[in-house]
Image: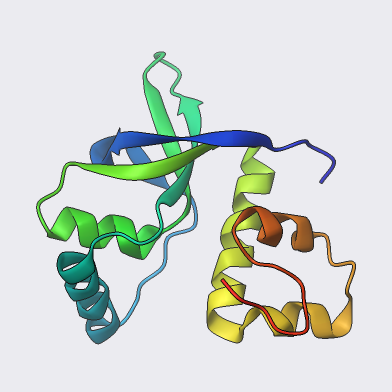
Amino acid sequence: MTETIKTGQMQMIPINLIDVLNPRERNKRVFEEIVTNIQTIGLKKPITVTPRSTPDGTDRYLLVCGEGRMKAFHALGETTIPALVIEVSDENAFIMSLTENIARLSGVNYLFRFNVNYPGRFLLKIMGYFFTRCFFR
């Protein structure tokens, strides 16, 4: 990963223009909690997407982080969602997506126990994680 990630801009993105890069299923109870949380207090963190054009020239987006939030927004009847739009390659978008999933499932500390210079560390910092004695988001 030698690419420079360009700082993103916040935009309202139509949900129907977002393709999921790394789809996953979550249990129904967890999904319902996400929906209820967003319905009650709103979206605390925007999703992250990267722009792509289709062969016919249509502008679309690849979802990098936030599939659960996006699906919950859609379930609530929303047609657009706040998104941080960044420009990254497909490879780096996939790495960021996996890094987010690992951080959520295992805790960020797990990533750094074995190698403090893990290449995803930079991506985690961009996504709001900070390397200190503990990780706070």
x and y, in percent, of residue 122 in the image: 76, 56
When asked about the image quadrant of residue 107, the answer is bottom right
The residue shown at (24%, 80%) is: 33
The chosen color scheme is: rainbow
Kindly tell me whether residue 87 is visible in this rendering.
Answer: no
Give the camera-side residue of 36 and 100.
36
Give the camera-side residue of 82 and 1.
82
- Is 28 on the left or on the right of 114, as rendered? left
The residue shown at (42%, 60%) is: 23
x and y, in percent, of residue 121 in the image: 77, 63
When asked about the image quadrant of residue 123, the answer is bottom right
When asked about the image quadrant of residue 6, the answer is top right
> Does 73 sit above or below residue 53?
below
x and y, in percent, of residue 98 in the image: 60, 64
Give the camera-side residue of 25 and 125.
125
Kindly tell me whether residue 60 is visible in this rendering.
Answer: yes
Give the camera-side residue of 99 and 40.
40
Q: Farthest residue toward the top?
A: 57
- Is 111 on the left or on the right of 136, as rendered? right
The residue shown at (30%, 59%) is: 43
Q: Quadrant of the C terminus?
A: bottom right
The residue shown at (16%, 70%) is: 40
